[in-house]
Image (spheres, grey):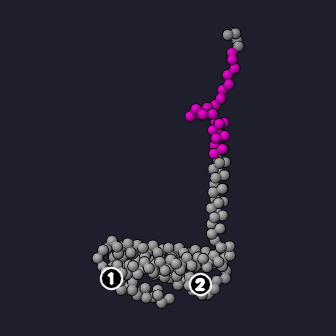
Amino acid sequence: MVLGYSKPTIVVPVDQAGADPTSLRILTQCLGWITLCVMLCGCNSIYHQAWATMPPDAGARLALRLEEARAVDRSARDAARQLLARLQQGGNEELIRVGFDRLEKEALELDRKILAVRDELGASVEASENQEIEALHNQAKTWSQFAAENRSADTHIAARRLEVLLRQAAGR
C-alpha cells in the first residue's frame, strides 16, 4: 500500500431491503407495462366477444332482450306453480321456503331483465312493446310483493292468493 493512495470506492445507495433503487425502478416499470398490456388485451377480447354475441342492429338487440325477459317471466310462472303445489300439499316448511326463495329470485331476475330492455330502448318504441314491458315490470313487482308478504302467512291463505295471481298472469 502506498501512502496517500487509496482505492476509489463507489457508493451505491441501497434501500432498507438491501436492493438497488435503480433495479427496483426498472422492475416496477416492467411490471407496470406487463400489467397494462395484459389488461388492454384482456378487455379488448372481452369487448369483442360480447359484441360477437350481440346483434348489430338496435332493433334486433331489443328483440333479444325482450325475449330474455319473456323467458324469465315463464320461469317465474313455473316457480309460482311449483310453490302453489307445495303450499297446497302443506307439510315440509323447508320446501315451501325454498319455493318462496325461488319465486323471489325469479322476480328479481325479471326486474333485472326489464331494466336491460329499457337500456336498449331508443327514442322510438312501439306502443305494444312499451305495454308489454310495463306488464312484465308490474308482474315482477307482483311476484316480489307476494313473496315478501306471504312468507309467514298461513299456507292455505298463501295458496289462495297465489292461485289468483297465477290466473291474472295467465290472462295477460
Nearest the eye: 168 or 17: 168
Mark 2 or mark 1, earlier in chain: 1
Residue 109 appearing in the image: yes
Q: Quadrant of residue 93?
A: bottom left
Q: Please state which of the two labelled residues, at mark 2 or mark 1, is closer to the viewer.
A: 1
Q: Which residue is mark 2?
A: 130
Q: Which contiguous range is marked in magenta?
A: 6-31
Residue 9 among magenta residues: yes
Residue drawn at the location 38% of the way across and 75% of the way down: 99
Where is residue 141 drawn, in percent x and y?
47, 79
Which residue is situated farthest in the left direction here?
91
The circle on residue 123 is: none
Disc 2 and disc 1: Cα gap in Å? 36 Å
Nearest the eye: 59 or 131: 59
Amino acid carrying label 2: it is: Asn
Crowd class of label 1 (few under 14; some 14 to 19; many from 20; radius 10 Å): some
Where is residue 118 drawn, in percent x and y?
59, 77
Looking at the image, residue 132 sits to the left or right of residue 86; the answer is right
Nearest the eye: 112 or 84: 84
Which residue is situated farthest in the bottom direction here?
171
Amino acid carrying label 1: it is: Gln
Where is residue 165 drawn, in percent x and y?
42, 85
